Image (spheres, grey):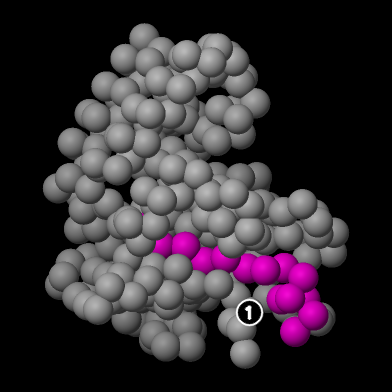
Amino acid sequence: MKILFLDESGDHNLTKIDDQYPVFVLGGVIVDRDNLENLNERIDQFKKEMFGTTDIILHTADITRNKNGFERLKEKAFRENFYEKLNHLIATLDFKVVACVIKKNEHVAKYDFAAIDPYMLGLNVLVERFYMEIKSDEKKGLVIAEKRDRTLDHELELSWLQLKIKGTRFLKGAEIEDRISGGLILKDKKENLNGLQLADLVVSPIGRHIIGKKTNKDFEIIEEKFRKDKNGKVGGHGLVVLPKDN
């Protein structure tokens, strides 16, 4: 079985759009369950080496703001060592990246009141790519996403049910239900799932790249991890940016 751990960057609000970050990214990492134990062990080892505990939760917002256990990142030497080892860890772990980026201003301009919620649109796109990934390996799948608030979680559960009933543009509902047989599971951040934390570390650099911000080492590593077709093409396979350019 393969697991798709999902996370997001930015908000999915289409009414008030942040000019500094006018995109919504839904992305994740695909991990073979056979590799999950190794992934967990190595991330826990990194946490213990850097912070002396495995209880700390790798969260981009806390890392960039030096809070909730990451206060030592204010120290230049510690910060440089942290990022060097984190980048090495991500580069050497076995996983694939899939992401859907919604350019919100363009999305609203194109569809107006008919614009689909970015989270739900991104979910459709990623379910299709995940389906194709596990079908090619003749495996089953499971999707794990982070809980948000009760209303949003119920909306996500309803969207998942609709996917199983109506399918997507390219997949029948029965195909999704049969292949992604583990379904969708929502987990609280406090449960400290390393797969979800890895997804969190992946999505923000993708968003920064799409809006044209300076590319750091982390994105260079992520770029190599994108799901690709047999010819090495990422666009449409590991990374989908919407609306598509004409």
As drawn, is 184 to the left or to the right of 62? left
- In the picture, residue 106 is in which quadrant? bottom right
Q: Determine crowd level at label 1: few under 14, some 14-19, many 20+ residues with C-alpha closer than 10 A.
A: some
Mark 1 lies on a secondary structure that is loop
Q: Quick check: is 100 in the magenta stretch?
A: yes
User: Farthest residue toward the right?
Assistant: 16
**Image quarter of residue 155:** bottom right
- Residue 221 position (above or below residue 16): above
182 relative to 100 in the view: left or right: left
Residue at the spot x=31%, y=23% of the render?
46
Residue 124: where, in percent of width, then height? 50, 73
Query: For the residue marked with disc 1, what is the amino acid?
Result: Pro
Q: Position of residue 188 (x, y in %)?
A: 50, 37
Q: Quadrant of the C terminus?
A: bottom right
Question: Residue 141 location, x and y as percent?
Answer: 28, 62
Residue at 72 percent of width and 54 percent of height: 21
Residue 172 drawn in magenta? no
Q: The N terminus is located in which quarter?
A: bottom left
Q: Is residue 230 above or below residue 100?
A: below
Residue 174 appears in the rendering? yes
Foreground residue, 224 or 14?
A: 224
So how many labels did they put on this image? 1
- Please state which of residues 2 and 72 is positioned toward the viewer in this rendering: 72
Q: Which residues are magenta?
A: 97-110
Residue 145 showing in the rendered view: no
Q: Name the residue that disc number 1 marks.
A: 243
Q: Position of residue 243 (x, y in %)?
A: 63, 79
Q: Is residue 216 above or below residue 171?
A: above
Question: In the displayed structure, would residue 74 be above or below residue 142?
Answer: above
User: Which residue is drawn at the image coordinates 22% and 48% (left, top)?
Assistant: 94
Is 126 situated left or right of 43 in this image? right
